[in-house]
Amino acid sequence: MVLQNEYIGGVTWGFMGVRGTWANADAETSMELMKATTAANWTAIAFSAVQATPQSTVIPYRENPTVADEEIHWAIRKAKTMDLKVCLKPIVNCADGTWRAHINFFDKDVPCEPKWSDWFRSYTAFILHYAVIAEQSGCEMFCIGCELVMSDRRAEQWRALIAEVRKVYSGILTYNCDKYQEDNVTWWDALDVISSSGYYPLQDWEAQLDRIEAVVKQHNKPFFFMEAGCPSRIGSAAVPNDWTLKGDPSSREQERFYEEMFRSCDGRDWVQGFMLWDWPAHLYPIESAPANDDYCMYGKSAAVTISQYYQSKIIMNPKENPNE
């Protein structure tokens, strides 16, 4: 299976979920509302395993708080009953609050110090576990990593990981590089699709798309934004990646960001879609949407913008899809 002309009108679902919070009525309603509200045709089912610190070399993915395998299977089945295509997206985070982009070790293995080789050994086991689930459950796409910026330079180890994943998973493979990092990854050729986090300032989209376009042309690969979004608070359209920004709730701020992002990307036929960030497994009540200042679009004006845009882009008849 390859991603050619298909448009990905996607939304990321479930990321903040922890063990025991999926596979219930609230989570089911959440996914149903996600599709009904946004007109999505894809979803990235995202969850995290938590290592202790950025220099830890063990990723305990079989333990709390990571959602259980049964919950992941449930979420994939639920998505498929709704005719959503699925990208399974396991993510590693740090328990001490450090952003995963700062997971880092010495370039050379040094005795008595934490090592890239040890971390990649654990990370490979983590990723292969979920690649098997993605294969068993028929996920159309699998994301091998998310915003691991300091590891991007470790091309040899990433290539070795990709080779191992291909032994157990037969679908589309991608890596979600961070914003501004598209031209720093040297191993796109080993993957099927280039994807990145589209948290670009509202006024900077055209310049960043110019830069990304050169990468896409160089590697001749499909491209989409594996993440993109903006909190609904004053000031966030200028720094959409800053989830800690202080500002009053503003549905219009979020809507303006989406309008400009969609307008800019409409002029680039190589942008094949988005997995918008994000939609939780447990939604806030719709009456509290005006006071909610997070990324979720539920009950906010941006949801209408997204739905209309996706409906204008998505091929509604599956038989017309060249990948089917």
Image (cartoon, grey):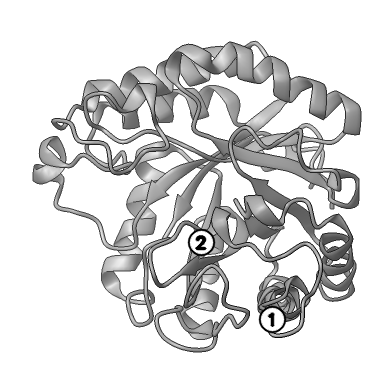
Residue shown at the point (39%, 70%) measured from the top left? 96
- Helix, strand or loop for disc 2: strand
Query: Could you tell me the amino acid type at mark 2?
Result: Ala
Quarter holding residue 242 = top left
Q: Residue furthest front?
A: 111
Q: Residue furthest bottom?
A: 63
Query: Could you tell me the amino acid type at mark 1?
Result: Ser
Residue shown at the point (23%, 33%) measured from the top left? 300
Viewer-proximal residue, 195 or 160?
160
Residue 322 position within the rendered picture, expressed as x and y whole percent measured from the top left: 82, 38
Relative horizontal placement of residue 193, taking residue 232 as reference (left or right): right
Residue 75 position within the rendered picture, expressed as x and y whole percent measured from the top left: 48, 69
The tag on residue 122 is 1
**254 lies above or below 97:** above
Viewer-proximal residue, 277 or 63?
63
User: In this figure, what is the number of numbered marks?
Assistant: 2
Residue shown at the point (15%, 45%) measured from the top left? 286
